[in-house]
Image (spheres, rainbow, N blue to C red):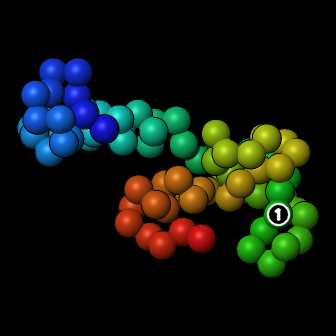
Amino acid sequence: MTSANCSCETGTCTDCAEDMQTFIQRVRELHQPVHENAQGYDEHGNYTYINPGCSECGTFGEFTVPWPCPTIRLLDGEEVS
C-alpha cells in the first residue's frame, strides 16, 4: 500500500507508514466488541451465545464471530488460521 503523497512507490516512506497506521486504526475502530447476547459457534463448535462478539465479522444475531476476531488477532500479531 502506498500513500497518495508517496514518491517511493514501495510503501516504505514516512507518508506510507503514516497512511498504514491510519488504515489500521480505522480497521480497529470497525472491529469492536459487542456486549449483547448474539449467537454463533464457540471454539468447541457448539452453536451458543457469544459475548462479546465482533461488530463487523459474521452476521450479528445469527452467526457472530467471537471477539477478538481473527482480524484483530492478526493486527495484534497473532497467528491466525
Helix, strand or loop status at disc 1:
strand
Residue sitting nearer the eye, 26 or 20: 20
The quarter of the image holding the C terminus is: bottom right
Whole-percent x, y for residue 65 in the image: 71, 54
Whole-percent x, y for residue 64 in the image: 77, 50
Q: How many numbered circles are shown?
A: 1
Observer able to see residue 25 = yes
Residue at screen point 83% across, 56% down: 40
Q: Quadrant of residue 28?
A: top left
> In the orientation shown, which residue stands out farthest toward the bottom?
44
Decide if residue 27 is on the left or right side of residue 2.
right
The three-letter amino acid code for the residue at tag 1 is: Tyr
Q: Quadrant of residue 2?
A: top left
Q: Quadrant of residue 48?
A: bottom right
Residue at screen point 67% across, 45% down: 57
Whole-percent x, y for residue 22 in the image: 29, 34
Residue sitting nearer the eye, 39 or 5: 5
Whole-percent x, y for residue 11 in the image: 20, 41
Decide if residue 39 is on the left or right side of residue 79.
right
Residue at screen point 38% across, 66% down: 77
